[in-house]
Image (cartoon, rainbow, N blue to C red):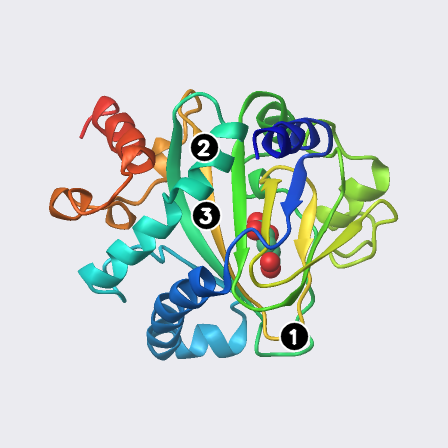
Amino acid sequence: MLETLMQCSRDYNEHGYFVLRNYFTASEISTLREVVLKFHERWKLDNETFYKEEAFNSSLITGSQYLNSQERIRLFNFISCPKLMAVINTIIHNQPAFMNTQLFFNPVRPEQKDFWHRDCQYDHDLEGQQKAIQETQVVHFRVPLFDELGMELVPGSHARWDNELELNVREELNGHQSHDDLPLGKRIPLAAGDLLVFSADMIHRGIYGLDRLALDILVFDATADFVDYVDDDCLPESKLLNQIKNPTLFENTLRLKCKSGC
Ligand SMILES: O=C(O)CCC(=O)C(=O)O
């Protein structure tokens, strides 16, 4: 396993992503699916218009709005289980800290198209994005709960700026649209049980289709200034923290929150 993880780390540094096939057992995935589906059904009822008109994801899955304490603990324990922590610690060496979770599904309207982006483009202008790519790191750990068409990624784009076409497409400039194909895009189909790890700041898009429902766990490097992005409610409060088998990932975030003035 150590050799596999070392290879994963090299792949991540070079390409910005890697996949561990069949990393989780059927029973691990079915336990996770059960709690995530509870969240999803309750979230859909509460966000009916948004869901029907435009949504393709939800977030704060570990929060208290849709899951009770026992359900949240199951989720926290999955996120910080030794199997996932081994991968997280391989990629983020300096006190990896939990940021959030997102759940990706198909938009209801079939005409809604999957679109290229870097996550940092929603917070920064072009100059800020260039800086973010060089200086910070947020990593997605994607756990598909059903087989899906997966993601399309531009390998290596976590560490370089866009070529002209890529920039035109993801920023919709000069007549291009964010769903146009990119010649360097690589499709990564995923099955339930796989784990896809990819840099949030690489050029990527989710591919809509099949019955996709994927839980993305977002983790950041404690040296980066991301703690303000973390919603308090998605972290375990102290009575829950005591029931998490392996709480370090959450404790790292809570410590950063305190430092920044809790
Ligand atoms: O799966 C999707 O629809 C998009 C995924 C994505 O953009 C992300 O995980 O940042």
Residue at point 68% right, 48% down? Answer: 204
Looking at the image, is mark 2 or mark 1 earlier in the sequence?
1
- Can you identify the residue that label 1 sits on? 210
Q: Position of residue 144 (x, y in %)?
A: 55, 60
Q: Which mark is residue 220?
A: 2
The kind of residue on which mark 3 rests is Ile
What is the distance, in whole Å, between disc 3 and disc 2 at their CAs?
Answer: 10 Å
Q: Position of residue 237 (x, y in %)?
A: 17, 45
Q: Quadrant of the N terminus?
A: top right
- Check mark 3 vs ligand 1: CB closer than 8 Å? yes or no: no
What is the distance, in whole Å, between disc 1 and disc 3 at their CAs?
Answer: 21 Å
Contact? badges 2 and 1 (CB < 8 Å)? no
Which quadrant would residue 71 be assigned to in this image? bottom left
- 16 on left or right of 74: right
Above-or-below relation of 222 to 197: above
Residue at point 47% right, 29% down? Answer: 89
Contact? badges 1 and 3 (CB < 8 Å)? no
Q: Secondary structure at mark 1?
A: loop
The kind of residue on which mark 1 rests is Leu
Q: Position of residue 244 (x, y in %)?
A: 23, 45
Nearest the eye: 253 or 82:
82
Residue at point 33% right, 75% down? Answer: 42
Of all residues, the one furthest to the right in this rendering is 183
Which quadrant would residue 226 be assigned to in this image? top left
The kind of residue on which mark 2 rests is Phe
Residue at point 58% right, 40% down? Answer: 200
Contact? badges 3 and 2 (CB < 8 Å)? no
- 101 on left or right of 158: left
- Check mark 2 vs ligand 1: CB closer than 8 Å? yes or no: no
- Can you identify the residue that label 3 sits on? 217
